[in-house]
Image (cartoon, rainbow, N blue to C red):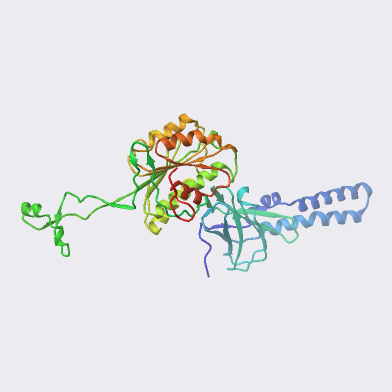
Amino acid sequence: MPGPPDGSAAEGGGRGGLPRALSGLTTRGRSFLAAGAAAGVCSYLLGQPDLLRVAALLVALPLVCVVVVARTRYRAAGGRRLTPTRVPAMSQARVVLRVENVSRLPTGMLMLQDRVPYVLGPRPRFVLDRVEPGGHREVSYRVRSDLRGRYPLGPLQLTLCDPFGMCELTRPFDDSDTLTVVPRVERLPVVRLGGDAPGYGDGRSRVLALAGEDDVIPRGYRHGDDLRRVHWRSTARYGELMVRREEQPHRARCTVLLDTRRTAFPGEGPDSAFEWAVTGAASVVVHMLQQGFTARVVTDTGSAVPATWAMGAAGGGGEASEAAGVLLDALAVVERSEGTELSRAHEALRGDTEGLLVAFLGELDEAQASSVARLRRRGGTAVAFVVDTQEDGTAVEGPLRVLRTAGWSAVAVRPGDLLPELWRRAAGVDARGTREAAR
């Protein structure tokens, strides 16, 4: 017999005694008791014995249901299977609930209910018919969120009720799961980024893996080593054949600066400028990881997301997918900051002397733009996407001029712009793949 879905299993039952069963009277059951009591009083006041029989029936029916539910003994195991556990925003995930009767007696009618946050949709409820001993039932529902974040699912609640709906007993299970809604990732074209820095010469393009210098410490010769790698000076010194160590690859780096200042991004919701910036940062880091770069995200607060570099692999292999998952999980819970300056980001990136720098920025004044402009290292490549918060486009003219003068490839982002096109524009490439003339 197949086991329950992945996740912790729990047991439930109708045990709890008469006091617990009485507290589980439904509105219908309480109404029957009230009507029976009223009929009994009327029977006494009016002297109608037939009305007393009706009162006894109205009172007895819910009480009998309470006794039946209280004496019901069953053991049920429940579980949940969430597929997948990580979904992009505006995508659906499927939840499968499984209830198994592990007792020797059949159950009555059961009501299954799962707790979900309101942003994922209405709370799912299912009515299950009688479950035979050793049998199980599976039901499923779908959840969808337009907002990124981590959302708890559960605990699962199993409600035992009588056929007349007079009494219900709810027993929660102790299992729960977490659905992670990550930012959407847009596929970016493979282009060669480069910046022109006035006074510094042409910017250098970063390759995927640069061959480093040989390790100066030789090692002993091993069968199969290339004789061309024999280190003759060490061989003469130690009296045995020594070879140079293999070249150690040096990975190119990419840092994505994400501006999270609340004052820099007006508006709320999944279509806001800030959510566009988070989506852009997620798309760039995933793209660079697939190209073999090591990548990280740094916010205006100076904190890295995650705290260490994520290592990619050319071709988007398993290593790149795992690293991308770590970054996306971290970006799923990035919130807006209450800061107004970018000085902490400048301090966090002060020690970086190499690698590609991509910034997603909100509203800037020229002083803040000058602070960002100093983040670009001599001869390095830096790209900035500045969100235009004004419809006339005048808000970004000054910051763009400051960034471009410092050698940045700065692009204004306006409502409706597509990130792949902006990525090409930052590299100076048009939609046909030809390089545009420098402006």
Residue 187: x, y in percent? Answer: 48, 55
| Res. 341 in view | no
Front residue of 31/152: it is: 152
Report which quarter residue 390 is drawn in.
Answer: top right
Residue 260: x, y in percent? Answer: 50, 38
Q: Residue furthest top?
A: 367
Q: Residue furthest bottom?
A: 1
Front residue of 233/395: it is: 395
Front residue of 124/330: it is: 330
Q: How many marks?
A: 0
Front residue of 54/359: it is: 359
Q: Quadrant of the C terminus?
A: top left
Residue 175: x, y in percent? Answer: 54, 54
- Going 92% across and 46% down the picture, which residue do you hit? 45
Image: 363 above or below 61: above
Image: 370 above or below 358: above
Compared across the picture, whether 124 is left or right of 199 comes to: right
Residue 353: x, y in percent? Answer: 32, 39
Compared across the picture, whether 289 is left or right of 123 comes to: left
Compared across the picture, whether 7 is left or right of 211 comes to: right
| Res. 213 in view | yes
